[in-house]
Image (cartoon, rainbow, N blue to C red):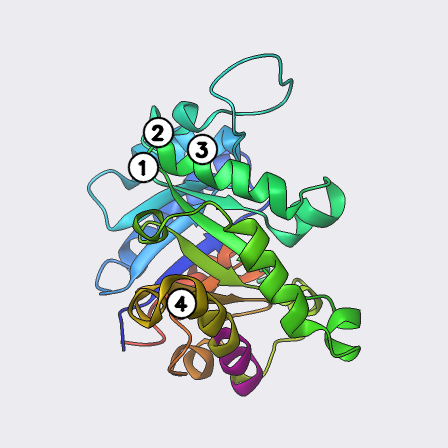
Amino acid sequence: MKNKIIAGNWKMNNNRVQAEALITELIPLVSETKNTVIICVPFTDLCKAVKLTKGTNIHVGAQNCHWKESGAYTGEIAPSMLTELGVEYVVIGHSERRSYFGETDETVLLRTKAALAAGLKPIVCIGETLDERNSGNMEKVLSRQILDGFKDITADELKNIIVAYEPVWAIGTGVTATDEQANDAIAYVRSVFASKYGKTAADKLYIQYGGSMNDKNAEGLLNMPQIDGGLIGGASLVAAKFAAVVNAKK
Ligand code: PGA
């Protein structure tokens, strides 16, 4: 199995004072891991996060970026504005962005392309809703999100992308997919990537699970062969819980 990539998604939480306290507490708790540790923080915390994590094993990510380099796009942030700060990763296409802010597979693709061009590593989120799963459409939805959302992504570009499989029904609900459900869905996701990029590239691709992952269930999930890491929301806001996820699989 590969080492894991564990990313915290703080969402719209933590002002600068709270961010400093959380990061300072987290640094010693995750310093021994062989896994990759990323924290994806609000735009306003990025400077602080980059500064505090300098010289540590914690990497910093943003939660969105636009596809244009500059211009009349009020409220948006260009990828190069992130790299300039020392940000390395960016979450793209989170289900909250898709459902509340009109994100589509097409805009996911545009943002991913622009992020890659700027040298960022995108964490691209996909996942089905409960209705889609219950009506037997899970595979159809996931394959559409991959085939449309990765349409122009080259095999070389794929090497710098992390995929997060996040079933919408498990996000922030306390309902986690079982180890097997998560593993099976990710196996399916990997098979779609294999059909597009070949088996070797698909095997190398990091695919995280996200959705109510925490200190209690991380070990089971992270020991599943298809699951290459986690994207952690709520539990990433508590240093000890997030560290327990990071350290769950040695
Ligand atoms: P959650 O969020 O861990 O709070 O369910 C995960 C995510 O949205 O990335």
| SS for dot 4 | strand
Along the line of sight, which residue is nearer the eye, 138 or 101? 138
Q: Which mark's residue is nearer the viewer, 3 or 2?
A: 3
The Cα–Cα distance between marks 3 and 1, rounded to whole angstroms, is: 27 Å
**Image check: 9 left or right of 127?**
left
Question: How far, Cα to Cα, is label 3 from label 4?
Answer: 24 Å
Q: Find the distance from the CA under tag 1 to the CA under tag 2.
A: 16 Å
For marks 3 and 2, give the CA distance.
12 Å
Give the amino acid type for the residue marked by disc 4 in the picture: Gly
Q: Secondary structure at mark 3?
A: helix
SS at circle 2: helix
Disc number lying in front (1 or 2): 2
Q: Which of pointers 4 and 1 lies earlier in the amino acid sequence?
A: 1
Q: Residues within 10 Å of mark 2 (few under 14, many from 20)?
A: some
Measured Cα–Cα span from mark 2 to mark 4:
24 Å
x, y (%) of residue 134?
77, 79
| Disc nearer the start of the sequence (2/4) | 2
Q: Please name the residue that numbered disc 2 is placed on.
A: 83
Mark 1, residue position:
52
Q: Is 205 in front, or is 52?
A: 205
Residue segment shown in magenta: 180-186
Residue 173 on image: x %, y %: 70, 67
